[in-house]
Image (cartoon, rainbow, N blue to C red):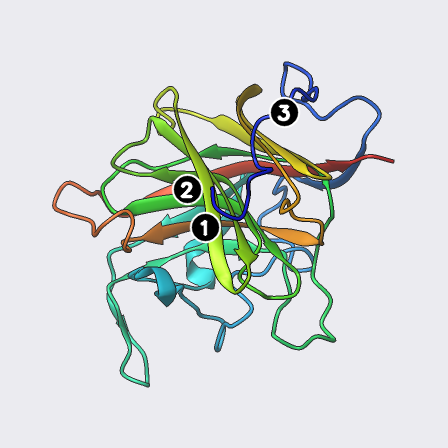
Amino acid sequence: MAGMAAMGCTSAAGPAPDGQAPDGWDLVLDEGFDGDTLDQDTWGTCHWWAEDGFCTLSSTGELERYGPDGVDVADGTLRLTARDEPVTTEDGDRYEYTSGMISSGRASDDAADEPRFAFTYGYAEARLRVPAGRGLWSAFWLLPVTNEPLPEIDVVEVLGDTPSTARHHFHWALEGRTESEGRDREVDDLSAGWHTFAVDWRPGRIIWLVDGEQTWELSGPAISDEPMYPVINLAVGGDWPGDPDGSTEFPATLEVDHIRVWQQP
């Protein structure tokens, strides 16, 4: 790819075959969603640009409005639920759907705000059960604490009309433009049960894994070297997945069993 000739596979050893973090690494985030409320010291329910607790991601053409009503914790599981319930704001903006997300980044664009949780390099995983249905877009990704849009590590994205494809991406900025690398991996139907998605992020290299199996590796000087924070969301519609249709069932829920991050001592 132009501007990224050093990107490519390497022969560096990856994580253990069972998908767990390498031996001896420290567990720095262990979120099992115990109890019946979201830990607000670690998680917010919108992006940093939220207004009155609500937000969306209009740059990708999404149709949902994220808010706390789309987030529920019970029985050790986080549930992010998308509903077919149009909303019109006081400013006249209309959203055809509501949904849920969590983020451990800053609560605002104020540089004095500390991120709730962030890390540089490590092994990050989430155990998810994703919904099927056209127009549904489940994602587990990492963003920089600077509140800039790049770099971005997409641990996994699953489109509801192709739930047997795990999609991995890395996006970065180069000379004022966005560069991207991605890999689609055909796997079992991810909407049929629980699956664990992870990245092993080290200097100059990222390895992606699904259920402990390495699915992609990328290396090169553009690999992120700054603190990043996790986001998990269930988007509805957009330029990539397309709009829901009559076959899409609502409410639709992305379930999260846990999120964990390990780092080298």
Tag 2 secondary structure: strand
Question: Where does the image place residue 82, in percent across and percent down from the top left?
Answer: 34, 52
Q: Amino acid at mark 1?
A: Asn
Q: Nearer the viewer, mark 1 or mark 2?
A: 1
Tag 3 secondary structure: loop
Residue sitting nearer the eye, 63 or 10: 10
Question: Where does the image place residue 23, in percent across and percent down from the top left?
Answer: 80, 21
Residue sitting nearer the eye, 194 or 48: 48
Task: Indicate left or right for 141 with 243 as reference.
Answer: right
Residue on which the image places disc 2: 254
Task: Indicate left or right for 84 with 70 as reference.
Answer: left
Disc 3 from disc 2: Cα separation: 33 Å
Residue at horizontal 39 percent and vertical 21 percent from the top = 187
**In the rendering, which numbered label is found on residue 263?**
none
| Sequence-earlier tag: 1 or 2 | 1
| Sequence-earlier tag: 3 or 2 | 3
* Residue 46 visible in the displayed image: no
Residue on which the image places disc 3: 10
* Residue 221 visible in the displayed image: yes
Disc 1 from disc 3: Cα separation: 31 Å
- Residue 156 against residue 228 in the figure, above or below: above
| Sequence-earlier tag: 1 or 3 | 3
Question: Where does the image place residue 130, in percent across and percent down from the top left?
Answer: 39, 36
Q: Amino acid at mark 2?
A: Leu
Task: For the residues labelled 1 and 2, say whether their Cβ atoms are less than 8 Å apart.
Answer: yes
Q: Quadrant of the C terminus?
A: top right
